[in-house]
Amino acid sequence: MDEIRKTINSIEEIGHSLAEKTQKRLDNLTKPQGSLGRLEELAKQMVDITKNENPPVRHKVIFTMAGDHGVVKEGVSAFPQEVTAQMVYNFLGRGAGINVLAEHTGARVVVVDMGVAEELKDENTELKIKKINFGTKNMAEGPAMTEEEAIRSIEAGIEVFEEELANGIDIIGTGEMGIGNTTASSAIAAVITGRPVEDVTGKGTGINDKAMAHKVEVIKKSIEVNKPVAEDAIDVLQKTGGFEIGGLAGVILAAASKRIPVVIDGFISGAAALIAYQLEPKVKDYLIAAHCSVEQGHKIILDYIGLKPLLDLDLRLGEGTGAALAMNIVEASVKILTEMATFQSASVCERIDK
């Protein structure tokens, strides 16, 4: 817990010392003031986060963390648990959606085993092993993990970030893989936001209506059995979370402590952001919501934190795919700020106010 406290204590409240200068710069670009909308807002946020008038976006990193969930025994997913490990190998073989989109946006993908239910062959040195356990326990019968495991998962996320920082990081994205993790994320969302389970639960990997009703009942049972305390993020993670969710929360906290922007992906990444936000509300201003997932609980999470998504493309894959796409938009916003001509430099007449 000391490492978590140390990281949280290093997170500064976002100041706006460069805000006036940045706004003036944007207003002097060859366009009507405010005409590039969210791009201008993003550019200002990037300057505020980094305290840099020309925010760097060269080193893009997406952390894709994998973990299994004991609650799959309750029949809440359309896919078997073995898919988690299989997809990790797919990530390493560069055959997954995140690999394609990360390459498209110029990001490197860091794949982390946070708690896959089998021993992964460490033949590929690109795989980071931070395994807390071989999957969580069945949260419908008791806590998903011990308090120590919950703390270790967050600390492992901090460790992974700090290890990669040496290779250069200007902006990060969060992603995940774990059969059953929409069930855990729905439980986290329901507990922390206070919304009914039905409001925050979606069909995940594509279950039918009957399975969906069962999933809702499993989540309700899990919350009733464990009675997680909404104000205590560690308690919520311990009782209803996942190792990859804890790991991503750690990554988010670590990035914020280094004033590095965080592009969060979909529903599960949103649940991790919710844990990080409960631990330290100041992380909100370091977060950029990539998109709004098809999972209905995602919008509720974003509204609770106070984030406005950049994209709405009916995505529900996870892995960090939405974050990879949104990084292109963030980079575009910085290029507008730093590369676009001003009225003076382009010898363009400015607006005449009547």
Image (spheres, rainbow, N blue to C red):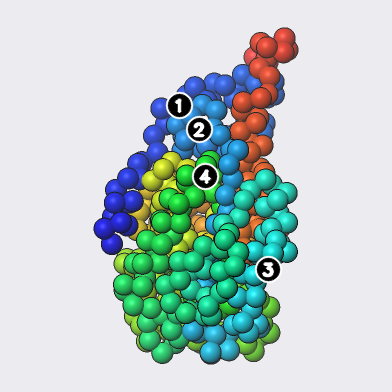
Provide the residue designation for mark 3: 90
- Rounded to the nearest angstrom, the CA distance separating label 3 from label 2 is 36 Å
Number of callouts in the render? 4
Residue 167 marker: 4
Look at the image and tell me in which quarter the C terminus lies: top right
Label 4 residue SS:
loop
Label 2 residue SS:
helix
Residue 153: image quadrant is bottom left
Number of residues whose C-alpha sits closer than 10 Å to that of mark 2, classed few (under 14), some (14–19) or many (20 or more): many
Number of residues whose C-alpha sits closer than 10 Å to that of mark 3, classed few (under 14), some (14–19) or many (20 or more): some
Q: Earlier in the sequence, mark 1 or mark 4?
A: 1
Type of amino acid at the residue the image marks with label 3: Asn
Type of amino acid at the residue the image marks with label 4: Asn
Please state which of residues 180 and 195 is positioned toward the viewer in this rendering: 180
- Rounded to the nearest angstrom, the CA distance separating label 2 from label 1 is 7 Å
Type of amino acid at the residue the image marks with label 2: Val
Q: Tags 3 and 2 in contact by the CB under 8 Å rule?
A: no
Q: Tags 2 and 1 in contact by the CB under 8 Å rule?
A: yes
Q: Nearer the viewer, mark 1 or mark 4?
A: 4
Instruction: Residue at 58%, 59% (x, y): give it.
Output: 126
The reply to whether residue 205 is visible in this rendering is: yes
Please state which of residues 93 and 315 is positioned toward the viewer in this rendering: 93
- Rounded to the nearest angstrom, the CA distance separating label 2 from label 4 is 22 Å
Q: Nearer the viewer, mark 2 or mark 4?
A: 4
- Rounded to the nearest angstrom, the CA distance separating label 1 from label 4 is 28 Å
Question: x, y percentage for residue 279?
Answer: 35, 58
Q: Tags 1 and 3 in contact by the CB under 8 Å rule?
A: no
Provide the residue designation for mark 2: 47
